[in-house]
Image (cartoon, rainbow, N blue to C red):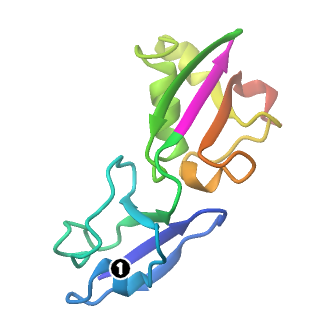
Amino acid sequence: MRIYIHREAHDEAEALDSSAVGSIADELTLEEGELVLLEDQDEPLDTTLSFEAAGVDDRAHVFRGRRHPIEVSVEYNTETHERQFGASTRVERVFKWAVGKHAFDLGEVDAAEHTLALPDETVPPGDVHLGSLDQATPGRVAFLLVAKHRHEG
């Protein structure tokens, strides 16, 4: 079984060929306080189990790190919405929440014309995990909901 491991402060995933018998903690050589979350999930996996026993599928993506959950804020038109997400949550999921009815409630056309940017106006790819974006402010990630045309060439 192949698992893709994402980590705090790392942009790229590492591939791990997992045995069916070793615990997640042993296979990843976890350090004290590290958690493992399945991609886009808010609850950590039981690291005493194997990946297979924990319900992790072949070619799944997991996130390992110490910071969980992540406090996320999104600002749009001088209004800010905040919510906690798991460190393994992808930017794409935060965007869907931000444009949806629980935050800014943008229509489909308006949502398609916007994207999430970091405060320095860098636009992270949708598949980046929140736990990879909080180096400057551990446990917190702030986004701006901005028009895409500002960031397209």
Residue at the limit of the structure toward the front, as seen here: 32
Residue at x 55% of width, y 20% of height = 111
Residue toward you, 64 or 48: 48
Picture quadrant where residue 116 is located: top right
Residue at x 78% of width, y 41% of height = 122
For label 1, the crowd category at 10 Å Cα-Cα, with few meaning under 14, some 14 to 19 and many 20 or more, is some
- Quadrant in the picture for the C terminus: top right
Compared with 2, 120 (above or below) is above
- Quadrant in the picture for the N terminus: bottom left
Picture quadrant where residue 123 is located: top right
Please name the amino acid that badge 1 sits on: Ala
Residue at x 52% of width, y 67% of height = 6
The chief SS type of the magenta part is strand
Task: Please tell me how many numbered marks the rendered image carries.
Answer: 1
Residue 128 seen:
no
Residue 49 seen:
yes
Q: Is 147 colored magenta in this rendering?
A: no
Compared with 73, 11 (above or below) is below
Compared across the picture, whether 5 is left or right of 58 comes to right
Residue wearing tag 1: 25
Q: Position of residue 117 (x, y in %)?
A: 71, 34
Residue at x 55% of width, y 42% of height = 91
Residues drawn in magenta: 71-76
SS category of the residue bearing label 1: helix
Compared across the picture, whether 100 is left or right of 76 comes to left
Residue toward you, 65 or 108: 65
Compared with 145, 57 (above or below) is below
Q: Is 72 colored magenta in this rendering?
A: yes
Q: Position of residue 84 (x, y in %)?
A: 46, 35
Residue toward you, 88 or 112: 88
Q: Position of residue 141 (x, y in %)?
A: 63, 39
Q: Position of residue 9 (x, y in %)?
A: 66, 63
